[in-house]
C-alpha cells in the first residue's frame, strides 16, 4: 500500500513538472572520466582498465520511461571503429535501440541514464579464454548522486569473433536489462543476487535479450546448459544463466509484462531457503508441473523461434514385472524425470501425493489406478517437481501381474 502511494506521488510530480529538459546529464567523456571506469582486482578477478584512450561519443539517444526521459550513449576510443569487426559499433547502437523500444512492454520499471563503454582492451587473463567462456561485457549499477556516479555503466569487450547480427545485440540487450534490474529493484535485492548464484538476475536478462534479438543463440547455449543442470540434479535456484529456460517458459505462458512483477518479489537474501520460498510463491504446484511437462515434451521454445533445441534426459528407468514398491527421491525444485515400463499383465497402482504426473501417449495425468498391458507393454514418462522445503519422494506400489483380473490380492 505504502509503495503504491509513493509511486502515485512520483507520477504526479512528473506530470506537474512536465518533461525533463532534453539534455542528458552525462559527464564529459575525457581521460579523468574514463579512469573512473577502472576496476580493481578482487576475488580472483584481475584488475581492468580501458587505458589512456582518446574518448569520443559514438551514439546517444533518448527514450521515454514510466519515470521520465532517459538517455543511452556509447563511447570509446576515437580509433575504435577502425580496429574492430566492421559494423560492431553500429550493431551495439542498434541493439541498444531495440532494447530500449522493448522496455515499454515491461510496464512499470526504472533505469538510470546509461553509458556503454566499448573497449578493445581486455585484461590479460580475460584474453585467455576460461572454460566458462570469455567475458563479453559487465555492468556496474549506479547509485550515486552526480551524473557520473548515478549512471548505469556497461563495459563491452569487442572481442573480434562476436557476430554483429546476433551476439553483439544480444550482449548489449542483456546488459541493458541489468540496468533495468538495478534501477527497479532494491539495493539489497541487487546485492543478494551473487550469493544466490545469479540465477534470477541472469535468467531474466537472458530472456529479455532473447526477446529483443529473437534468434536462437548458440554461443551462450542455455538449452544445453539447462539439460546438463537437470542431469546433475541441480535445483532451479542453483542454475545460474541456465535458469533462462524457466524464464522462456514464463514468457510463453504470461508474456513480458509478467517479468517485472516477478522480479520485484525476488529475495533480498542469497540464502537457499529464501530462493525456495520465492519460487514457491512465484508459481503454484500445478504451474511447476506445467513447466516440467513442457520441458519434457520439448515445447518450451527459444523466444521468437518456432522450434526448440531443448531435450530432456531419461532419468531413472523402472522395469515393473512383479509386485513391488518403487521410490524416486525428490529434492526441492529439482526436475525429476523417469520412465516406468510395465511388463505384460494387469496392474494396480497406488502412488503417494507427490507433485508428479505420467504421460501415456500424448496426454499427461496423475498416475492411473490401473495399468492394463495385456495387449503389450505399457510405457509411462514420469515427471515430478517437488516444491516442499524438505526432501520428499514419489512412491509407487504395484500389485497384479500376468493373471488378469483376479491377481490384485496377494496369494
Ligand atoms: Zn548478465
Image (cartoon, rainbow, N blue to C red):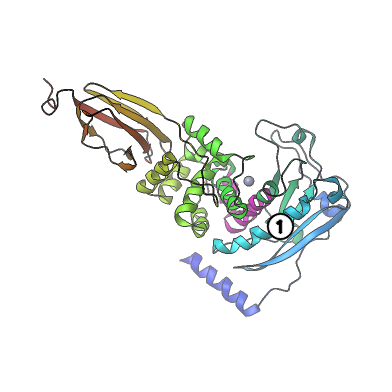
Relative image position of residue 261 (x, y in whole percent): 49, 58
Viewer-proximal residue, 59 or 187?
59
Q: Judge the density around disc 1: few (<14), some (14-19), many (≥20) Cα neighbours within 10 Å.
A: some
Does 125 sit above or below residue 180?
Answer: above
- Image quarter of residue 177: bottom right
Magenta-colored segment: predominant secondary structure:
helix
Relative image position of residue 42 (x, y in whole percent): 71, 37
Q: Say which residue appears at 52% left-offset and 53% top-offset.
A: 263
Q: Say which residue appears at 71% left-offset and 66% top-offset.
A: 62
For this orientation, the residue located farthest to the bottom is 16
Is 1 on the left-hand or right-hand side of 23?
Answer: left
Q: What is the count of numbered marks?
A: 1
Is 96 on the left-hand or right-hand side of 7?
Answer: right
Does 147 sit above or below residue 390?
Answer: below
Is 125 on the left-hand or right-hand side of 383?
Answer: right
| Camera sees residue 331 | no
Mark 1 lies on a secondary structure that is: helix
Relative image position of residue 305 (x, y in whole percent): 54, 49
Q: Is mark 1 within 8 Å of ligand 1?
A: no
Relative image position of residue 46 (x, y in whole percent): 75, 36
Name the image quarter holding the C terminus. top left
Does 348 sit above or below residue 355?
Answer: above
Magenta residues span 171-193
Q: Which residue is mark 1?
A: 94
- Image quarter of residue 12: bottom right
Q: Say which residue appears at 54% left-offset and 43% top-offset.
A: 199
| Camera sees residue 83 | yes
Amino acid at each position: 500500500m505504502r509503495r503504491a502511494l509513493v509511486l502515485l506521488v512520483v507520477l504526479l510530480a512528473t506530470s506537474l513538472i512536465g518533461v525533463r529538459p532534453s539534455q542528458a546529464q552525462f559527464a564529459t567523456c575525457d581521460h579523468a572520466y574514463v579512469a573512473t571506469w577502472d576496476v580493481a582486482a578482487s576475488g580472483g578477478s584481475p584488475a581492468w582498465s580501458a587505458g589512456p584512450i582518446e574518448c569520443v561519443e559514438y551514439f546517444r539517444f533518448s527514450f521515454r520511461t514510466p519515470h521520465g526521459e532517459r538517455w543511452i550513449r556509447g563511447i570509446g576510443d576515437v580509433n575504435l571503429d577502425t580496429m574492430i569487426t566492421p559494423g560492431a559499433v553500429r550493431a551495439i547502437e542498434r541493439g541498444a535501440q531495440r532494447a530500449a523500444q522493448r522496455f515499454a512492454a515491461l510496464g512499470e520499471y526504472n533505469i538510470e541514464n546509461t553509458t556503454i563503454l566499448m573497449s578493445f582492451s581486455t585484461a590479460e587473463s580475460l584474453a585467455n579464454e576460461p572454460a566458462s567462456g570469455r567475458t563479453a561485457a559487465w555492468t556496474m549499477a549506479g547509485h550515486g548522486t552526480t551524473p557520473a556516479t548515478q549512471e548505469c555503466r556497461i563495459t563491452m569487450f569487442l572481442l573480434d569473433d562476436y557476430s554483429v547480427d546476433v551476439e553483439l545485440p544480444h550482449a548489449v540487450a542483456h546488459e541493458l536489462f541489468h540496468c533495468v534490474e538495478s534501477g527497479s529493484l532494491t539495493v539489497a535485492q541487487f546485492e543478494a543476487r551473487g550469493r544466490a548464484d545469479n540465477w534470477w538476475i541472469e535468467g531474466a536478462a537472458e530472456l529479455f535479450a532473447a526477446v529483443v534479438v529473437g534468434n536462437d543463440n548458440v554461443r551462450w547455449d542455455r538449452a544445453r546448459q539447462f539439460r546438463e543442470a537437470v542431469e546433475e540434479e541441480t535445483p532451479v535456484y542453483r542454475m545460474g544463466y541456465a535458469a533462462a529456460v524457466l524464464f522462456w517458459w514464463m514468457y510463453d505462458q504470461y508474456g513480458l509484462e509478467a517479468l517485472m512483477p516477478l522480479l520485484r518479489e525476488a529475495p533480498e537474501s542469497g540464502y537457499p531457503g529464501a530462493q525456495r520460498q520465492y519460487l514457491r510463491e512465484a508459481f503454484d504446484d500445478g504451474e511447476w508441473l506445467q513447466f516440467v511437462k513442457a520441458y519434457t515434451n520439448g515445447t518450451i521454445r527459444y523466444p521468437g523461434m518456432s522450434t526448440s533445441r531443448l531435450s530432456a534426459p531419461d532419468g531413472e528407468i523402472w522395469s515393473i514385472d512383479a509386485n513391488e514398491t518403487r521410490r524416486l527421491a525428490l529434492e526441492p525444485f529439482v526436475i525429476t524425470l523417469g520412465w516406468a515400463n510395465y511388463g505384460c499383465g494387469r496392474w494396480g497402482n497406488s502412488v503417494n501425493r507427490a507433485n508428479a504426473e505420467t504421460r501415456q501417449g500424448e496426454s499427461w495425468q496423475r498416475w492411473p489406478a490401473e495399468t492394463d498391458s495385456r495387449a503389450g507393454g505399457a510405457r509411462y514418462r514420469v515427471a515430478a517437481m517437488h516444491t516442499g522445503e524438505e526432501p520428499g519422494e514419489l512412491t509407487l506400489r504395484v500389485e497384479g501381474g500376468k493373471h488378469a483380473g483376479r491377481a490384485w490380492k496377494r496369494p
